Amino acid sequence: MKKNLRRALALALAVVTAFTLFVPAFATEYKMTYDKISPCGEDCEYYPTIIVPGLGQSSVCVTDDNGDFLLDKDGKKISAFPAYIQLGKIIGKVLFPALATLITQHDIGFSDAFADAIYSAFGINTSDLKAQNTGNVVTEKYMYPYSQFSDYEVETVNHHVPFERYSTELPKDHLYYFAYNSFGNHIDLATELYDFIQMVKAQTGHSKVNLVPLSQGASVVSAMLEYFPQVGDELHKVIFVVPAIGGSMIIGDVFNGRINFLKKDYLYNGFLEELGLLDEYTARLIEVAVRILPDEIIMEALNKGVKTLIEDIMIRSTGMWALCPPEDYPTAAEKYLSSPEMADIKAQTDRYYQAQLHAHANIQALVDRGVMVFDLVEYNVPVINVAERWNTMNGDFIIHLSSTSLGAYSANVGETLPEGYTQKNTHCSDPSHNHISPERVVDASAGLLPDTTFYFNGNRHDLTQYNDVILKIAMKMIADDEITDVYSSPDFPQFLWGRNVSGIIELTDAAKGIDKSKLSDSDRQALENALANTQRTLDNNLASNDDLQKSEEELRAVLVKLGAAQEKEKEKDPSFLRRISLYLYENYGTNGYSEMPLLAIKNLFGKIKSLFA
């Protein structure tokens, strides 16, 4: 039950923060260091590489008024992303209004307290009317290569991008990490990135660098290409990884008021199961439990909470506006930025809107200059159902495919291209090239870079760091120039599988830590066979997630027998809760328990009346 409660609390946070699935203020001043660090210069075979991470993949920490880091009970710095949650403070705001509301079944300040609690958590990321962050936060910056990272910095960065496992071929004094605040000022971030490139060139003696923008990081790079077009002469290679070049339809729908869980008929009948963040047992449990309050109170609290999050936090962040698709920006800007007090923010977002409109042309200009540009994208996963358009286009759970792929054409998730369909060849002039995915879902020829874009079927955006093939190909592209297009290596064809190796890696590490000298011959042989089979599967870039699951199950069975792992936890049977939830919805709609008796009496009298009609 405690686990279900934790899941319910996690869901409550996830629902409110799903929008932020996509200036920095500094407690101390960070200075660019232009002293030369690497002795290689232009004669080196490697280009310095700058990782531009995605949403929340930088360490942004809470500070006190003196600029000192706040620490948790374990002595670790407290993160400000996506919120600074002070549980005691939140309980203090919500507890008594919640109890009064529960007892009276009327909104006795609960919805206002809920919105206030949202602001108390997310308010640390708010900005002023010039889009400059006003909270006590500091972004931990790395003005030096990975080779000089402290153990703490290595652990922090590897939590988001596992360099240690996949970058053995790279010289660590040529690897850099551009950290930034995802809620920050977008023009400032683009300027900082340009200056960061100049610093890296000075430190390494190179005249060109590689860029690896991930997710939201691509919006920062896109802005830089627009504001500093001369940077094209300073780039050797750009490797986009699930990039938010065209924003995310989630932000577009949220900023335009198209939010699914604010429609109570969907919230009480399907939203939680389709959310993709909960098992059905927990989803149904919440559906049943939420009826403890009348639906009007639940919806009022959600509406006020969402309004607070959008109007007091998100629309003041130009970093968030950079994730609004260009087709959605004009109406959203008219809705939120048309007042005189928002003029400064609108001037900045208008500027990035132009960068979005020019994004494909700016990337093509890089290619025309001789810069090698690659794109690694994911597809065949519905966009999270917070957005109204979630099941109307192909995506990777967070970003729609036409954004990440720079315009590729596709069928919707669960569908295929029409029979007899021929590829559009919008950007491919070679008739011998086949850019249609094997399962006939994607036409890559319609994307801007048909010959240098790699697709991963069934991979979720938020699980990208657990797809070893994406990481291997990215690191290979950083290390050398052997891969020039989708035809360069049979190990990396254009269309690959989505896969999650987190579980199998954990088991493999556990297996390697076993003292084999203490095992019987049969147990040692079983362990070695399972490890060898697992490694063969991992080494096969064409192996699917199903193949990995089979290897994982074999290895787990051996480890369980040896006492080095536990049986995989079985999901609870949701059938009983499903029947209850469906019964309640079919017979009482979205009404709370306190409303059901009166509704039942009304229904009874209605039936009696119909008998005598």
Image (tube, helix red, strand yellow):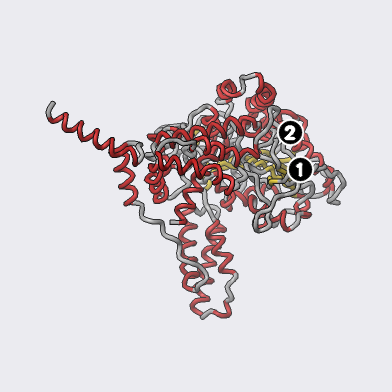
Does 455 sit left or right of 607 as displayed?
right
Q: Which residue is mark 2?
A: 188
The image shows residue 340, relative to residue 376, as above or below, that is: above
Element carrying mark 1: loop
Name the kind of residue labelled 1 in the image. Answer: Ala
Say which residue label 1 marks. 27
Mark 2: amino acid? Asp
**Residue 370, position as x, y percentages in the image:** 72, 35
Residue 321 drawn above or below residue 282: above
State whether residue 511 is above or below residue 3. Answer: below
Frontmost of labels 2 and 1 is 1
- Can see residue 429? no
Q: Residue at x 81, y 39 (%)?
A: 198
Query: Residue 399's quadrant in the figure?
Result: top right
In this view, the residue in front, 162 or 607, is: 607
Which element carries disc 2, helix, strand or loop?
A: helix
Could you say where residue 560 lies in the image, as x and y percent from the top left?
Answer: 48, 70
> How many other residues sit within 10 Å of disc 2, few (<14), some (14-19) or many (≥20)?
some
Q: Is residue 304 left or right of residue 343?
A: left
Against 448, residue 497 (above or below) is below
Quadrant assignment, res 287: top left
